[in-house]
Image (cartoon, rainbow, N blue to C red):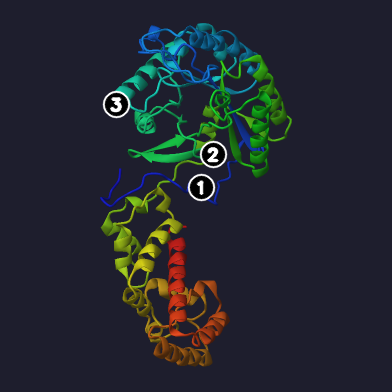
Amino acid sequence: MRMTDAPRYPRDMTGYGANVPDAAWPNSARIAVQVVVNYEEGGENNILHGDAASEAFLSEIAGAAPWPGQRHWNMESIYEYGARAGFWRLHRMLSQTPVTVLGVATALARAPEQVKAMKSAGWEIASHGLKWIEYKDAPEDVERADMAEAIRLHTEVVGERPRGWYTGRCSENTVRLAAEEGGFAYVADTYADDLPYWIRIADKDQLIVPYTLDANDMRFAVPAGFGAPDEFERYLKDSFDMLYAEGGRMLSIGLHCRLIGRPGRALALKRALDHMAGHEGVWFATRAEIAEHWARTHPPVTFERPSEMTRARFVEAFGGVFEHSPWIAERAHTLELGPTHDTATGVHSALVRVFRSASYDKRLGVLKAHPDLAGKLAAAKRLTAESTTEQASAGLDALTDDERAAFTEMNAAYTEKHGFPFIIAVKDHQKAGILEAFRQRIGHDGETEFQEACRQVERIAELRLETMLG
């Protein structure tokens, strides 16, 4: 729950960033390969199912459109092929492979033989919703009710409730509704990463195991998709090879019985999977297995998120990052913060935006708020805790008499010339380097040194935040 009235941007545009976690897959595997079989046949739009029109999505019919109030015999038979032939071809091919079925509940209810075969093969059967329909305009209460009915029907047909959820044609509410439902080990309605990740929704940590629309046979049925089976095969192999080389990644492969189940395409899938299986350190796993592993190995981390802080708490936490200048934190809190700002780099970005856009006099005030290096305030132990630690880290709390005299002389000369104390991010330097920089920068003209001092202030803030937030 958001704790602040300031503008907030809910999307996380950072993710793991440069610090991708070690997936630590079982048996030191380099990659997890996850095969999804979407079972939608019998759950598509059809007036027999109480829908207003026929299906028009993901079929062999180019440019298909819904037929209001009519059955579309050709479309129905294409979906029937997926149930009658395509599924069984995939079942024979993948019976020894861990597979996650994303099953539309009404389709599963019309497929007792297929469900029995899925269970006999040990496949995970996750939920693909109640019906294979579009939810972008669905009222929230309708979507919530359909989700509950999907779980009920799935449990009745399969014998246990689904542990995973994927709507596919979802709304902006779908992931939140699935998290609020509370019974899913993972939700798959995102395409945002190569690894699982946690999101915080309504005070609950929900694991996301992202799905894919690129390594997916649906691209046989959309414009600018795969024109021939070998294109799909090559794309799967290249995706695998890249992720295998990087190590510690996950490859999701999306399949549909009526698409990849056609004989001219199925063989390309087999060649791609054989290529993957021919490598050492490949973990073929269900999505539930991946979710279990991730939850155990990388549990959610609870921390105070800067983007959710009240204004008072934000200023309390970060008001001292720029020396004696809490106004910077006050203004930063009014910016469009979000999950991407819940890191040292994110908070630093917000603070320096305020600093850089401030007037010359305001920035000069920040510079003047800094103490002299190894000056009278340090001797009197009147520095801020941050400045005390920083100066000590470079040995400025243990100067020889000659060094102290040199600093005193240069402090006076520098301040007289530039109108503010010499500022340097001491954690980046040792004592000798600081003295050398001091001697060089005294000779700068006023504008050059003002800009350099501002850069050093920003660097000091960055180092402080890294200490505070990691």
Q: Residue furthest right?
A: 278
Relative height, residue 247 to residue 124 (above, below): below
- The residue that disc 3 covers is 139
Q: Is residue 282 left or right of residue 286?
A: right
**Location of residue 48 in the rendering, given as x and y in whole percent from the top left corner:** 39, 6
- Label 3 neighbourhood size at 10 Å, few (<14), some (14-19), many (20+)? few
Label 3 or label 1, whichever comes before in sequence order: 1
* Circle 1/circle 2 CB separation < 8 Å: yes
The amino acid on which the numbered mark 3 sits, given as a three-letter code, is Pro
Which label lies toward us, 3 or 1? 3
Mark 1 or 2, nearer chain start:
1
Q: Quadrant of the N terminus?
A: top left
* Inter-mark Cα distance, 1 to 2: 9 Å
Residue at the spot x=42%, y=60% of the render? 349
Whether residue 279 is visible to the viewer of this picture, yes or no, is yes
Residue corresponding to mark 1:
16
